[in-house]
Image: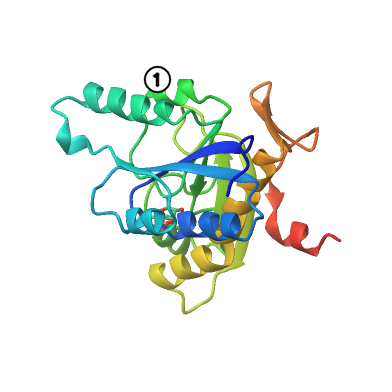
Amino acid sequence: MPEPSAVRVVVLVSGRGRNLQALIQARDAGTLGAELVAVISQRDDAPALDRARAAGIPVQVVQASAYAERTAFDAALLAATQAFEPDWVVLAGYMRILAPDFVRAFHGRMINIHPSLLPRHPGLHTHRRALEAGDAEHGATVHMVSEELDGGPAIIQGRISVRAEDTPDTLASRVMEDVEVRILPFAVRALARGELRWRDEGVEYRGRRLRTPLQLDELEEAP
Ligand code: GRF
């Protein structure tokens, strides 16, 4: 059972929920240090919802099609998220652009996982674009969320080598399996421990301002 004082995390999802599953696994292993208090989905058919239910996490669907106006949807999403009183909001494959009010409400308390080595390839179709650009390396980034799409300060990245035979699908699989499911739990653990902080529009990790993102391979090699 989570400790009553645990850091409260609300996870926003849209899709398959593999990143969410990585957080659930870390929680179940007792290594997350945070309570997953709710999963909010943008779609009622997201497989991520089944993963959340199976893990005993309250779920809520806030679907844009249920609202006549974008502003009503935005207000409903903000209210639904605030109702769970999160310390942090984690975007784990959330595929809608958030309203400025939502971003402001969780300023310095919201992270996102993006499947590229930001600042390369913000936005969609990152795996295809990495191949088209002839990138030798690709990966994923966890970053703080700012009002600029995929533009907030980066926290941690993991990289893989691009192979000659790679397709967007093979790249996507390796980025997910080798990088995403490792860097997201790392970031949540660090923020739960108070090791990650937002200060002066930047990120501090263990009291030191991050000028470049942490690198997964270096962290895993460290004693
Ligand atoms: C991930 O690649 C994430 O980085 C991107 O969308 C995908 C979501 O996958 N934003 P899942 O829902 O975690 O399986």
Task: Name which quarter of the figure residue 83 lies in.
Answer: top left
User: Which residue is drawn at the image coordinates 62% and 61% (left, top)?
Assistant: 29
User: Which residue is drawn at the image coordinates 33% and 49% (left, top)?
Assistant: 14
Q: Is mark 1 within 8 Å of ligand 1?
A: no
| Kind of residue at badge 1 | Asp
Judged left or right of residue 140, residue 201 is right
What is the number of callouts on the image?
A: 1
Question: Quick one: which residue is furthest to the bottom in this view?
Answer: 165
Q: In this view, does 94 lie above or below 140?
A: above
Pick the residue in front: 121 or 63.
63
User: Which residue is drawn at the image coordinates 37% and 31% (left, top)?
Assistant: 98
Residue 222 x, y percent position in the rendering: 83, 59
Residue 110 x, y percent position in the rendering: 53, 34
User: Which residue is drawn at the image coordinates 33% and 39% (left, top)?
Assistant: 96
The residue that mark 1 highlights is: 101
Question: Quick one: which residue is furthest to the left in this view?
Answer: 68
Give SS at disc 1: helix
Q: In this view, does 101 lie above or below 174?
A: above
- Locate the C terminus and report the quarter of the image it occupies: bottom right
Q: In which quarter of the image is ligand 1?
A: bottom left
